[in-house]
Amino acid sequence: MGVIRSMSALLERATSYPTVSYAESPIVTDPINRQILSTNFFPPLSPQDILTPEEVAARLKVPPSWVYEKTRARCRNPMPCLRLGRYIRFAWPKIIEWLSTESQQQAAPRSVPAKRPTVRPAHRPPSS
């Protein structure tokens, strides 16, 4: 596999992947469930949107080890994932959202810290 040049390239690959329409989700006729679902701020996820690390890696055309590394807490901006015990699953819409914010952060100019002057120790005369 080739080296990833930028997050914008990953985002381009991710958005070109076919998605499932939310219009295909079942219609809720029960009034209580309809009320619960109407207060939900997130679109419903279909089973096709829940992916394993290997499936995410295949869609993004990266090695699975890269996906695992990006889910770790020590990563600067970890990839959003669902931890189910020892298993990890991903919501594809969240991955696309993460990629877009990551590419925007990389596009933003970064401030370069000023160089500190080199401090040299003072010359001491040899002790007698």
Image (spheres, grey):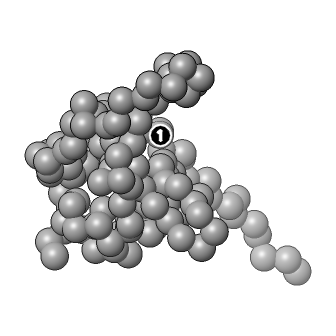
Q: Which of the pair 115/85 is nearer the observer? A: 85
Residue 90: quarter of image: bottom left
Q: Nearer the viewer, residue 115 or 34?
A: 34
- The quarter holding residue 62 reads bottom left
What residue is at 60 percent from the left and 73 percent from the top? 86
Could one spot residue 40 in this view of the protein?
no
Residue identified by numbered label 1: 113
Q: Quadrant of the N terminus?
A: bottom left
Closer-to-camera residue (23/66): 23
Q: Residue furthest bottom?
A: 128
The location of residue 57, given as percent across then percent down, is 28, 67
Q: Position of residue 34 (x, y in %)?
A: 50, 22
Say few, some or many: other residues with alpha carbon within 10 Å of mark 1 (under 14 / 14 to 19 / 20 or more): few
Above or below residue 39? Residue 110 is: below
The amino acid type of the residue labelled 1 equals Pro
* Mark 1, secondary structure of its residue: loop
Name the residue rendered at 75%, 66% in the picture.
Answer: 124
Image position of 116 (left or right of 51):
right
Query: Residue 88, how many percent across, how many down?
Result: 50, 65
Task: Identify which residue is drawn at 14% across, 50% down.
Answer: 17
Classify residue 87 as left or right of residue 45: right
